[in-house]
Image: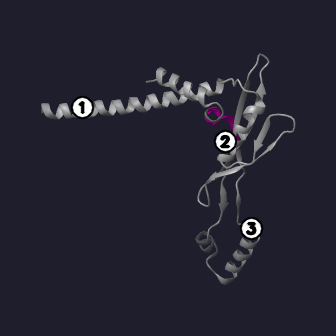
Amino acid sequence: MGHSRRVGGAFLSGVVLVLLAGCSSSLRQNYLRDKAGEHVYRKSLPDIWPGVKAELEAQGYSWKEMPGRYVLETEWLDSGGGTLGPASASRYLVEGLTLAHGGTILRVMRGNRLAQPVGTGYVTQQLATGGSARAQEEQAQARASATTSGVLPTQQSYARDLELELLLLQRIDPEAASKLAADALSAHP
């Protein structure tokens, strides 16, 4: 009985350590994102803007820029989904600003779009029509005119994306990102 309690206690201690390590890792990641969102770059916008474009390009996005300003909006990029589930896509709005007291900041908003495909499957159509030849012909015409399928209204949401702001910091100012990672480790060992 004493041996099983020791083994059980050791196992429980191991589980607690794993949970704490996961918790610390999550706290460090939150710390990094929050601090990246507050970061002021010492470089000018013309110096950091190519890094913004390089990161977005690496993620597969294309974009349009606002002439004369450091503002770009990406095209929608499919994130997944398909015939059985909702189709999702995302886009970014990135703005670079020069602060009055010096330095520059980047602000990123992420848009998410969700569209749920709807339609009538073949089996459902057969059950509904009884499978007669005339009903099948009517269903074929309906399918051809696309009246039996479609997409539910799209849902869109926008929020600040600190994750991309952190990735931009790591790409544009790796030295500051390294210092931030060290600070995160000190704050949440």
Q: Quadrant of residue 116?
A: bottom right
The residue under label 2 is 55
- First in residue order: circle 3 vs circle 1: 1
The residue under label 1 is 10
The x, y position of residue 178, in whole percent, is: 55, 28
Give SS at disc 1: helix
Q: CA distance from mark 3 to mark 1?
A: 62 Å
- For the N terminus, which image quadrant? top left
Q: Are marks 3 and 1 in contact (CB under 8 Å)?
A: no
Q: Quadrant of residue 91?
A: top right
Q: CA distance from mark 1 to mark 2?
A: 45 Å
**Amino acid type indicated by mark 3:** Ala
The foreground one among 106 and 179 is: 179
Q: Is residue 133 visible?
A: yes
Q: Is residue 90 visible?
A: no
* Colour mode of the rendering: one colour
Q: Are marks 2 and 3 in contact (CB under 8 Å)?
A: no
Q: Nearer the viewer, mark 1 or mark 2?
A: 2
Q: Residue at x 74, y 48 (%)?
A: 62
Q: In the picture shown, does residue 62 fall above or below 47?
A: below
**Amino acid type indicated by mark 1:** Ala
- First in residue order: circle 1 vs circle 2: 1
Highlighted magenta segment, given as a residue range? 156-169
Residue 146 - label? 3
